[in-house]
Image (cartoon, coloured by chain):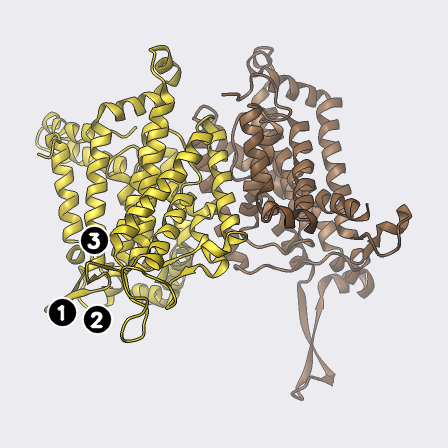
Chain colours: A yellow, B brown
Amino acid sequence: MFGLSKADTRLFLIVIGLTLFAPFILNPFPEGSELAQFNAGYPDLMQRFLIFGIFAIGFNILFGLTGYLSFGHAAFLGVGSYAGVWMFKLLGMNVLPAILLSMLVAGLFSVLVGYISLRRSGIYFSILTLAFAQMSFSLAYSVLTPITGGETGLQLSANDPRIFGQSITDAGTIPVPSLFGLEMRDSFQLDVGAWLFTFNAGYYLCAVFMVLAFYLSIRIFRSPFGMMLRAVKSNQQRMTYTGLNPKPYTLAAFVISGMYAGLAGGLMVAMDPLAGAERMFWTASGEVVLMAILGGVGTLIGPVLGAGFIKYMENIVSKINDNILHQWFSFLPDGLEDVVVAIIYPFIGKGWHLTLGIMFMLVVIFLPGGLVEGGQRIGGWIGRRFGKGGSSAEAAAKPDAKSSPAE
Amino acid sequence: MDAFILQILNGLDKGSAYALIALGLTLIFGTLGVVNFAHGALFMLGAFCAVVLSRILSIAHVTVDPTRTDFLGNPLKVSTPYVHEWFGPEAGQTLIEWSVPLAILFSIPIMVAVGFAMERGLIKYFYKRPHADQILVTFGLAIVLQEVIKYFFGANPIPTPAPDALVGSFDFGALLGFDPGTIIYPYWRLIYFMFAAAVIAAVFAFLQFTTFGMVVRAGMADRETVGLLGINIDRRFTIMFAIAACVAGMAGVMYTPINSPNYHMGMDFLVLSFVVVVVGGMGSLPGAVFAGFLLGVLESFASMPAITTVIPGINQVIIYLVAIVILLTRPRGLMGRKGVMEE
């Protein structure tokens, strides 16, 4: 189906299913229960899952396939956000032109950066992309303030022209982003017993883009073009000797992943029309590196999982404080409870970055294929251990491993 | 003319910090062939050594003085640092005041231990892995180290002043025959520059004039042959890693009075130091030092009002701009060795 192999179709349908039913899946605990704080099914966070998923998929097309480690990808996301907000300011509040222009501007910017940076490889490439991103960040903060809004960021105001829309609504407020009248923050809430599910228009717009982005990424991974990119990673010299010029392929991959970042930036402002320079800071680029690698670089689904994992930790796990921990462990004897809480507390709540750093190191050291590889290994182990015949379970696990090679 | 000299001086102290960190990075890259993204974190650990020492020295015990009362009328609680008791109030106070310079001695064993543990515990397994993996794992380590520091010391900068005697400023203009008051330069920055120069000289002398240094240089040039001669080069490279960590740590200790240490100061310096290293040439020690001072001075020149009015914003991007131009025109940096990381 869709021109995909059987295994890929299955993966693609799973992803479609997960994004479609995420408001249910991410809200497993009833309202008001003690575990409700682990519910991630609110629109703001679900949108972020998808947007950073798109960003990480794009980064994975560059790093996962070609092996070029870019430390400046956030610059494209930032440029895309600015372009999107300007579209809202000048044209009107429809999100489609804003998102398209975000992708276009980010794409053009990545042609420029990529053309120069790709003249070098390895660590030099990382440093060059880092230098470009830091330059964009500093300029956005200082000299380009008329375009970027400087430290306060770029915001909508009631004085914007908005040629095809209204500068200000009849109620006197600044209009909100919409898709042909469907406002992005519109939600439909469904009460089922103790559960409350929110279906948000903006989320489903992100979902459409994310599914398309994921589909394109599968096609790229399976195409002859993707094969060329893998060749760049495994042995560029040999590729040159066979008479192929790796440069256009890597540049194309760089621009595609830059446009993915631009799309993520565009969606970000479509959800919340505000853009700031801190989105371009190099730690933001580092974050997408973390996402892709934690999830499993070079695999299809890995970066999305990584993005979801990190955003979940950032928004949910970081909220846990020591009082909540004491509640959890109150069944233990007093002294032991304090000890357990004291041991666990540094790793969650405000210290979630520490857990993230440790996990990231463990993944880089032991699991080059990220969480996806970890899952496959555990799955394989369970299959061998508890499956009926060892050989049949292994055979079942193998095509799975092939469908998303951990390389 | 006086503005010119002032900018050179301003550039030198920033340049010394860049040069010290870049020197350590290059030592590690030149010996072990490892790209260490955690080097900024080592700089930060050094800075926190100073914080720890000043806290240790100020550990006090509280006694109640019944003859005096505080503003609520209760008996006044007097806290006396233990060092006051042991060495007498005056010597004790001096000790507390001079905690930053003393922290250099304090930091050396700590940083050597940290460097040793890091190399044996982690880096050693990454010799053969691609540079991208090395960058990633050390990047992860940097996050872990800075979060640990954040957990113990909080997120706010901790002011760590220089000794009172060294606070003030020095009228450099008067010395050179300009009008007094035109070139004012804080003492501590001057000390920082001289300290950096001394450390750099010591590292170079160590490599140039000792047998150990000779073996290390031979190992940098051709590791395999040195190994075949029956020399345990890995051991020596581990020691060099510890020395590099130590250099970064001392740079951090001395930087605390200039900028109050916080947990992410290392990351701020790391990016610039990497730019410095590639501009100087990967694996070239003189290149790292030269590029450090060069970029420091260029940065301070670019922030002169005369230049920012002509090209606005140039002071923000000059370092990166120079790096991009140099990387594209001179593939191995300013002073890189032929054949080392040229592709």
Dot placed on the residue nearer the N-terminal end, 2 or 3: 2
Q: Quadrant of the N terminus of chain B?
A: top right
Q: Are marks 1 and 2 in contact (CB under 8 Å)?
A: yes
Along the line of sight, which residue is nearer the eye, A81 or A70? A81
Amino acid type, residue under disc 2 in the picture? Gly
User: Secondary structure beneath disc 1?
Assistant: loop
Using the rendered image of the protein, determine whether residue B179 is visible from the camera's viewpoint.
yes
Amino acid type, residue under disc 3 in the picture? Leu
Dot placed on the residue nearer the N-terminal end, 1 or 3: 1
Outermost residue toward the bottom in this view? B73
Q: Position of residue A94 (x, y in %)?
A: 25, 57
Relative to residue B113, is residue A200 drawn left or right? left
Relative to residue B36, is residue A313 drawn left or right? left
Using the rendered image of the protein, determine whether residue A367 is visible from the camera's viewpoint.
no
**What's the distance in space between the residues labelled 1 and 2, CA to CA?**
8 Å
Q: Position of residue B137 (x, y in %)?
A: 44, 36
Q: Would you place residue B172 above or below residue A232 in this image?
A: below
Q: Would you place residue A237 above or below residue A135 in this image?
A: above
Q: Would you place residue B169 above or below residue A222 in this image?
A: below
Of all chains, the one bearing label 1 is A
Of all chains, the one bearing label 3 is A
Disc 1 target residue: A194
